[in-house]
Amino acid sequence: MEYIEYHKDSWPPVVKSLAAVGILDLKIYFRCSHGGSHARLVMFMTTTDEFDLKVDFAKHALSSPIVAEWEKRMKEFQKPAPEALGDEWWASMAEVFDLNSQLATADEREGYKCAEAVSSIAAQGIV
């Protein structure tokens, strides 16, 4: 797929512009459905605390004619997710799990309903 080819060798002004607006890391994952009739893209970004998706992504898109051309070409391959709201192009999601933060506090907390699970297992004579 051409979208993947573009991203294998992204345009240098585009990646520099993304970094300039506060994007520290960005990954896009692609999955094509069986038969190839539908595709799903998931974008994962790490940004500065000050980053505002609507404001800063717009700044990026307008940063130069070459970046604007890139964005125009990429939109030809994309469509908003069904759950996207209003003018949202990429639908925001809430983080629900971070292994590193969970590991960092694992010895200091019990875990949601973990005691209940332990009791249930003990009652079954498994432990």
Image (tube, grey):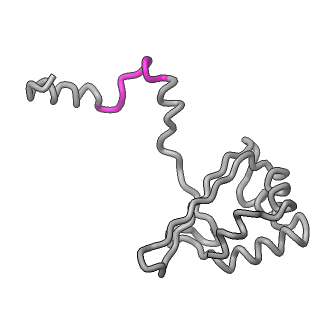
Provide residue 75's location: percent of width, then percent of height.
69, 76
Q: Is residue 103 above or below residue 22?
A: above
Q: Is residue 65 above or below residue 50?
A: below
Provide residue 74's location: percent of width, then percent of height.
71, 73
Foreground residue among 26 and 50: 26
**Quadrant housing residue 109:** top left
* Total numbered labels: 0
Foreground residue among 76 and 60: 76
Foreground residue among 100 and 94: 100
Q: Is residue 61 above or below residue 17?
A: below
Q: Is residue 92 above or below residue 49?
A: below
The answer to whether residue 70 is left or right of residue 126 is right
Q: Is residue 110 magenta?
A: yes
Provide residue 14's location: percent of width, then percent of height.
82, 62
The answer to whether residue 3 is left or right of residue 35 is right
Per the rendered image, the range of residues in magenta is: 105-113
Q: Is residue 26 magenta?
A: no
The answer to whether residue 89 is left or right of residue 12 is left
The quarter of the picture where the N terminus appears is bottom right
Q: Residue at x 48, y 79 (%)?
A: 36
Q: Residue at x 48, y 30 (%)?
A: 102
The quarter of the picture where the C terminus appears is top left
Q: Residue at x 64, y 54 (%)?
A: 27
Foreground residue among 55 and 63: 63
